[in-house]
Amino acid sequence: MFYFAYGSNLHPEQMRERAPAHRLVGLAALKDHRMEFPLYSPRWGGGVASVRPQRGEMVWGVVYDVTESDLATLDGHEGFRATGDQHNVYDRPALTVELTRPDDGSVPRRLRVWAYVARPSNPSPPSRRYLERVIAGAHEHGLPEDYVARLSATPVLEEGEETAPAS
């Protein structure tokens, strides 16, 4: 099954830990979406990534082919229990991405993929540590330079800084 990673799961080391049997399929774009940080993570000390529909925007990432066991492990890390479960931290909808640089030599194509989409809760800028993990993964996979530059310009929550209370 195909999984689209656009946040910290872009990082190869993190994916090896979470989904040891995964296989990289290639670079992909999620059109008419933007990345945001709608959920504060105590583990990361700041906001974590999600995608949201936004006409004319694009989120870059990679598609992995994962096993059912890997997907179950990813579900646990992302706080996904089941479709429609009110206690999900992230939902896991099927989205369509454009595979723009397949690593298997095939032609670019559209794919239906699983992706994790956060349920907003105390939005926060990402921590420097989290954003650096995302950017390192983006560099590792060769995401477009202009996209990586936009990621790099994301304001961060400095260590010791607190998020604004949710209203």
Image: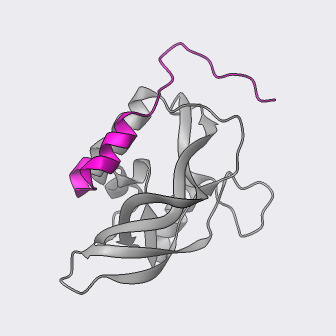
| x and y, in percent, of residue 59 in the image | 44, 58
Asked whether residue 67 is in view, the answer is no
In the foreground, 165 or 155: 155
The kind of secondary structure the magenta stretch mainly shows is loop
Check the image and report above or below for 6 versus 47: below
Q: Nearer the viewer, residue 67 or 83?
A: 83
Placement of 43 over or under 142, stated as above or below: above
Residue 26 is drawn in which quadrant?
bottom left
The residue most toward the left is: 105
Residue furthest top as drawn: 160
**Image point 61% across, 17% down: which residue?**
162
Residue at image position (41%, 53%) is 9
Visible residue check, residue 44: yes
Q: Is residue 160 left or right of residue 63?
A: right
Q: Position of residue 14 (x, y in %)?
A: 36, 50
- Quarter location, residue 110: bottom left
Quadrant that contains the C terminus:
top right
In what quadrant of the picture does the N terminus appear? bottom left
How many numbered tags mark residues here? 0
- Expressed as whole percent of the image width and height from the top left, the position of residue 90 reads 64, 55
Residue 162 part of the magenta-drawn span:
yes
> Position of 81 compared to 130: left or right?
right
How far across and down, in percent of the image, does residue 148 sit? Answer: 31, 45
Q: Which residues are magenta?
A: 139-167
